[in-house]
Amino acid sequence: MKTCSKCKIEKPLDEYPKNKPSKGGRLSYCKSCKSAVDKRYREANRGKTLGRHRQYYEANRERIREDSRRIRAANRDKIAAEKREYYRLNPQVKWQSKYRERANKYGIEAVIFPFTREHLIAKWGDSCHHCGGEWSGVDHYPVPVVHGGEHSLDNCVPSCMPCNQKSWRGGVSR
């Protein structure tokens, strides 16, 4: 047990950051106090720290990129599983990304008002807006993306893939 020099609370030794040069091999203040000190410094010296990070990146760009590639290659399966789980839990991220792609393709400005799957279900129900079946994505309805439709709860409805594809071709009544 050791008493923190900042908050004066007695805590176990593993609550103190390691510091080889110091007498006990630990800092005199606890991890939470160190975190607060570091945060205040970063906020007070934002420009300086950003400049240092930028300089370091410029000087070590290739090494950083190579390390990143190596880490991604070594953990490809784990990263893919994490991404799958993230997109499963947050389908709205993919919906927004797809909308941006399509808006860019049609040369229109992307207008996004974020919403979640839960918001969509609360407003439109948990079935395809067009056929009443199980839905898997969103359809920009009544104003499609090609006509400048925004990505908002008022312009998106739950839709199954067949109905969504029919609506692209004009097969679903708009």
Image (spheres, rainbow, N blue to C red):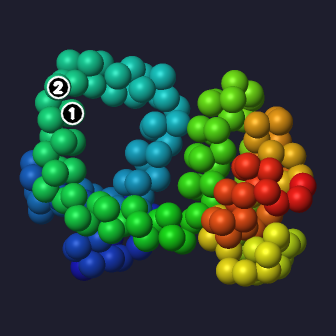
The residue closer to the viewer here, 132 or 24, is: 132
Give left or right: position of 96 versus 83. right
Give left or right: position of 124 versus 26. right
Residue at the disc numbered 2:
62
Give left or right: position of 157 versus 70. right
Residue at the location (84% across, 54% down)? 141
Residue at the location (27% across, 78% down)? 12
> How far across and down, in percent of the image, does residue 130 sit?
82, 70
The residue closer to the viewer here, 17 or 94, is: 94
Quarter where residue 93 is shown:
bottom right
Question: Disc 1 marks which amino acid?
Answer: Arg
Quarter where residue 138 is shown:
bottom right
> How far across and down, in percent of the image, does residue 127 sit?
76, 79
| Image quadrant occupied by the N terminus | bottom left
The residue closer to the viewer here, 35 or 144, is: 144
| Image quadrant occupied by the C terminus | bottom right
Task: Report how far apart the C-alphas of labels 2 and 1 lie in the structure.
Answer: 5 Å
The residue closer to the viewer here, 38 or 122, is: 122
> How far across and down, in percent of the image, does residue 5 sit?
36, 60
> How far across and down, in percent of the image, does residue 41 sit?
45, 37
Image position of 171 with respect to 78: above or below: above
Image position of 174 with respect to 146: above or below: below
**Badge 1 local density, few (<14 within 10 Å), some, or many (20+)?**
few
Residues tagged 2 and 1 counted as in contact (Cβ below 8 A)? yes
| Whether residue 10 is visible | yes
- Secondary structure found at label 2: helix
Question: Disc 2 marks which amino acid?
Answer: Glu
Give left or right: position of 174 versus 57. right
Residue at the disc numbered 1:
65
Residue at the location (64% across, 30% down)? 104
